[in-house]
Amino acid sequence: MDDLISHGYREEMATIKGYLPPRAKIGILSATFPVEVVDITRNWLRGPVVRASSDLSCPAMSACITQAVTVVTTEEAKLSKVCTALHA
């Protein structure tokens, strides 16, 4: 999200959001939370859940991030994997 805003895509994102149904579920992912991202979050989301990582024992946050790739073959498997990851 922060990269999209920094490259001038805020208006385009708002236009796309305007085409979504009122009860659409929207997820916002951002490496950082500058004022613009917080503003969009407040305006676009209903009861947002924020998950933040701030391990002060880590000299650089990028050194504390683990990435994983999971291959799924069905929509049901994808939903299950995403839910498992979000609740970890």
Image (spheres, helix red, strand yellow):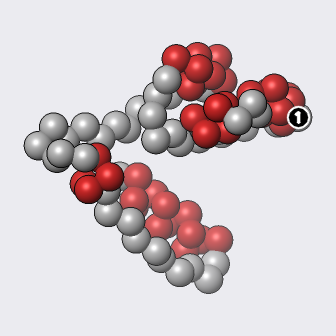
Q: Position of residue 45 (x, y in %)?
A: 60, 26
Residue in the foreground of this view, choosing between 49 and 41: 41
Rendered position, 18 above or below 69: above
Q: Residue at 65% across / 71% down in the picture?
A: 75
The image quadrant where one finds the C terminus is bottom left
Q: Residue at 39% across / 61% down in the picture?
A: 84
Using the rendered image of the protein, determine whether residue 39 is visible from the camera's viewpoint: yes
**Label total for image:** 1
The residue carrying mark 1 is 19
Q: Along the horizontal axis of the image, is 53 left or right of 41?
A: left
Name which residue type carries label 1. Answer: Tyr
Using the rendered image of the protein, determine whether residue 17 is visible from the camera's viewpoint: no
Q: Position of residue 37 (x, y in %)?
A: 56, 25
Q: Quadrant of residue 21?
A: top right
Rendered position, 75 above or below 22: below
Q: Secondary structure at mark 1?
A: loop
Q: Quadrant of residue 44?
A: top right
Rendered position, 80 above or below 57: below
Q: Residue at 25% across / 37% down in the picture?
A: 54
Q: Position of residue 9 (x, y in %)?
A: 76, 33
Rendered position, 69 above or below 60: below
Q: Along the horizontal axis of the image, is 38 left or right of 52?
A: right
Q: Quadrant of residue 42?
A: top right
Residue in the foreground of this view, choosing between 40 and 78: 40
